[in-house]
Image (spheres, coloured by chain):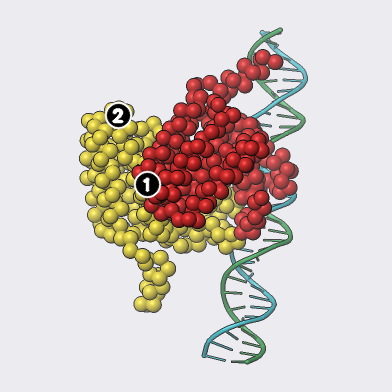
Chain colours: A red, B yellow, C cyan, D green
Amino acid sequence: MAPKEKATDTASTKVAEALAEAIHEHRIAPGTKLNEDEVGEVYGVSRTVIRAALQQLAHQRLVELKRNRGAFVARPTVKEAREVFEARALLEPTMTRHAAERMTEADLAVLQSHIDAEHAALAAGQTGKALQLSGQFHVEVARIADQDTIEEIIAQLVARSSLIIALYWQRRAALCESNAHHALIKALANKDGALAEELMKNHLLDLLTSLDLREQTSAPQSLSEALKV
Amino acid sequence: MAPKEKATDTASTKVAEALAEAIHEHRIAPGTKLNEDEVGEVYGVSRTVIRAALQQLAHQRLVELKRNRGAFVARPTVKEAREVFEARALLEPTMTRHAAERMTEADLAVLQSHIDAEHAALAAGQTGKALQLSGQFHVEVARIADQDTIEEIIAQLVARSSLIIALYWQRRAALCESNAHHALIKALANKDGALAEELMKNHLLDLLTSLDLREQTSAPQSLSEALKV
DNA sequence: TAATCCGAAATCGTATACAATATCGTGCAC
DNA sequence: GTGCACGATATTGTATACGATTTCGGATTA
């Protein structure tokens, strides 16, 4: 549905986007090593391009670069998870209020289309895509607020959140939070800034509390799993 | 005073830091083109390394990468300036409150040493260095709050702020804001979170209002200056 | 004179080649 | 049998080479 060719983009950006999508859709597990030759083979480009792409992803914290050891898909810690949502809690409510004050019909349509696409993806069983669209909703709010700088920060935090949710989500099947987005749209459409701000604040709190943030998961988990077999 | 060799760092990071310092100290004017061959010559490394360094700086928004045209020292717009300080205003006051609640004697000493170094730099006429240290103070507060993620975001915003201040500062000679930092330290030492938060909020507001953010400066300015000659 | 159209030179984007470092299996000592 | 040293292999870090794109100056023309 989105085969738009950005001719102005460099090859490394395309590879970075493809890898980011794979990571978000959880098709590459956190902790996986991304061998430069291997990835280069997949996308049919040289290591030069791959290295640039990996550096971009490292800046987004989707992969971790270890000197002389290579790139690994990021494995966010519990502390990092809390911090990411704390940062979002500080930025997004205010953005939502600003957005409410600037909403146009066009903006409303864009937000609604995000929700619709998310529902469609969910119905088709593409939870990964639904998650990504759900995140895009938040970025869109910052765009409507006309705050490029904060929008970019939020985009990065949302990307990290996707990874975190994929790792720590408790009731995966649910993803029922689109209710929250629906209520938000209504408040935004009514230009009720105060309500929209409050709804976003609660929405982010809900997201955080729906995560299972007890210390464990990372290395120990895979070890015990391996022992079970 | 800080010739610490980080052996774990890659060559491109060292180049990036060196370039960042030069940009912050205003030794390279905004808008200047950074020719890859030229920069490589200066630091005695190949274009491969330079390109990686420039990509890092681009992510920090200290340089702008234009496809097939090269890298240019960033020239923050007025809108960007406002947005950067808006973002800081959303993040830093809360960080300051958290920091107040966690302050230790060691943290206090570090903050004080920053102030002292800043005064020393000012006395020596190194306004660039003073500005950088003044910014580091803010990053340190986030570190004390033990919020790695937000600390990193603030570090980037502070770096961009340095560039913005260098561009739009009205009463350059003053830089008297160290008073604000001094008051902040006192509040932090007393673990008075509410006061510290308020002080930081006002400090950031002061900074923003002390900038000359009328539309102009960028291209037109240099043009008219050229015409005068 | 001013505008436009080439074409050479400069510069960037990508691929390949070589050097430095880490990884991992093998053999040795205990 | 276990632990450690060491060398072959694999992988990353950096330099160089080549092709693609842009830039800029001069010639041409209205």
Task: Specify the label residue A193 is tagged with.
Answer: 1
In the image, what residue type sits under mark 2?
Glu
Q: Do labels 1 and 2 touch, CB within 8 Å?
A: no
Q: Position of residue A223 (x, y in %)?
A: 62, 19
Q: Secondary structure at mark 2?
A: helix
Residue at (66% x, 38% y) in the render: A124
Regarding residue A38, the answer to whether it shows in the image is yes
Task: Specify the label residue B101 is tagged with.
Answer: 2
Q: Position of residue A55 (x, y in %)?
A: 58, 44
In the image, what residue type sits under mark 1?
Gly
Q: Position of residue B41 (x, y in %)?
A: 55, 56
Residue under mark 1: which chain is it in?
A: A
Regarding residue B1, the answer to whether it shows in the image is no
Answer above or below: position of A185 versus A127.
Answer: below
Q: Quadrant of residue B172?
A: bottom left
Residue at (30% x, 34% y) in the render: B97
Q: Are marks 1 and 2 on the same chain?
A: no
Answer above or below: position of B18 versus C10.
Answer: above
In the visual, does B82 lie left or right of A175?
left
> Callout 2 environment at 10 Å: few (<14), some (14 to 19), or many (20+)?
some
In the visual, does A205 lie left or right of A225?
left
Q: Secondary structure at mark 1?
A: helix
Image quadrant holding the C terminus of chain B, namely bottom left
> Callout 1 environment at 10 Å: few (<14), some (14 to 19), or many (20+)?
many
Residue under mark 2: which chain is it in?
A: B
Q: Position of residue A214 (x, y in %)?
A: 49, 21
In the visual, does A46 lie left or right of B209?
right
Observer-nearest of A54 and B50: A54
Q: In whole angstroms, how far apart are the C-alphas of marks 1 and 2? A: 32 Å
Residue at (50% x, 59% y) in the render: B72
